[in-house]
Image: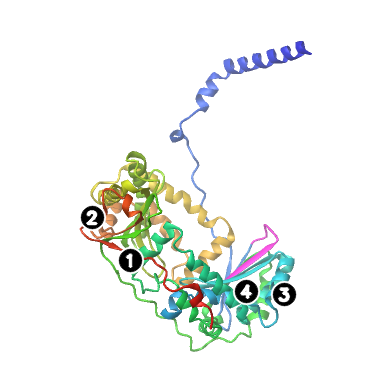
Amino acid sequence: MRRLYSLLVCFVLVGLLCFGVYNTSWAATAAKHYTELQLPPLPQVKIPKYERYVMKNGMVVYLMEDHELPLVSGSAIVRTGDRFEPADKVGLAGLTGVVMRSGGTTKHTPDQLNQILEQRAAMVETGIGETAGNASFQSLSEDLETVFGLFGEVLREPVFAQQKLDLAKTQLRGAIARRNDDPDDIASREFQKLIYGKDSPYARTQEYATLKNISREDLIKFKQQSFYPNNMILGIVGDFDSKKMRSLIQAQFADWKPNPNLVKPQLPKVSENKQSGVFFVNQPQLTQSNILIGHLGGQFNSPDYPALDVLNGVLNGFGGRLFNEVRSRQGLAYSVSGAWSPRYDYPGMFIAGGQTRSNATVQFVRALQQEIKRIQTQNVMPKELAFAKDSTLNSFVFNFEDPGQTLSRLMRYEYYGYPSDFLFRYQKAVAATTAADVRRVARKYLKPDNLVTLIVGNQSAIKPPLTQLATQVTPIDVTIPGSPTQATRN
């Protein structure tokens, strides 16, 4: 047995030796540095075939067949949002979106609704965010008629059960009580207030008092303001026959009366609340500082957005200037980022920041400021430009990973009034962006001398002090007003 084992070992060694002798040239040519690899060009992205039509009651419908899996999913975008809720009832839109589904319908109690869906491994969900409302469903193809019927019920006949509203408010009160537990959350929340203003719909926060002001009648009224077929875009994708799907939609929604007096709501005005300054939230338990700096930004439909996105690639991510200089070379950051972050129909922000040790806080802020100034004054090198453009263009295909994602994008563009080929125009503009374009937009849009700076950290551990950044450092009090017991329903 031992002899057999020895022979096997010999055969293996001889084989390896032969492989090494006769395949040395192969090994030499096969091992290449990653920069020498020749990759094929990216495939051209094509939009799957789809159908768009408008029902007599004004509902816009998109249909996109996809028979790869026996699944059907759909969503409706409704023109509403929490930016339209009253200032003394912040949280109303979110509660409306939650309880619209959790509270059941006129035909099914919440438990009945849940049971029917669970038995079919299906889903119906609703929600209202900052700029839009959404209702969605997903089901197996064989259960489509049943699940789509429940989807229609939730959209048209929610009852907003008081018990479910009470539960949702209790959960929100818990979230308010915990909102200062995470320094990242504190920084993000308070930075938005500094940029937009604490009373702006894009920055205000729900409080115990605003939740207390919200009643079931408020939810019903808020829903009735916007949930109409002529204020909605419905999109369905999956394993269905379009002709049969049209009939199903007709049966479910044709008798839903439009609102002839519906007026597109006026968007809240946006102005820059703070144009500079250093602000500080003291959190003595922290061993590091969470830092954000920036100013008001712009929208996706800016003709300079593609060049600004390439600028993001130069600044941000692995291989970007912030990572290479602030994190790797200077060793000042656990994480660092910076980007021009636009929005569809109101100005976004330019925002940079990260986390660093307490005694490196001032140095970290100065390093960020320096990199923002440097991109305005020093030309982008060819390798930097190529890396930023390649990263952006290579990630382009991930916008179309599946038909559902593509359909969602088409619906979103229509909702915000963008052309359906917006992303392809953007792709071409990114490919055409030059180093001069990046420098131009950096000079035009970035404001290194007018940055709002926010630090969340341990005041006693920050050495040198923040007064080295500005003669006046403004403290921010994040104490939560009121108490959960005061916010319960009367």
Residue farthest along the left direction in this orientation: 471
Is 188 in the magenta?
no
Provide the secondary structure element on which disc 2 rests: helix
Q: Residues within 10 Å of mark 4 (few under 14, many from 20)?
A: many
Find the distance from the CA under tag 3 to the CA under tag 4: 11 Å
Provide the secondary structure element on which disc 3 rests: helix
Provide the secondary structure element on which disc 1 rests: helix
The residue where tag 2 is placed is: 467
Q: Amino acid at mark 4?
A: Ser
Q: Nearer the viewer, residue 259 or 331?
A: 331
Front disc: 2 or 1: 2
- Mark 2 / mark 4, whichever is N-terminal: 4
Q: Position of residue 45 (x, y in %)?
A: 52, 54
Q: Amino acid at mark 2?
A: Thr
Disc 2, disc 4: CB below 8 Å? no
Q: Residues within 10 Å of mark 3 (few under 14, many from 20)?
A: few
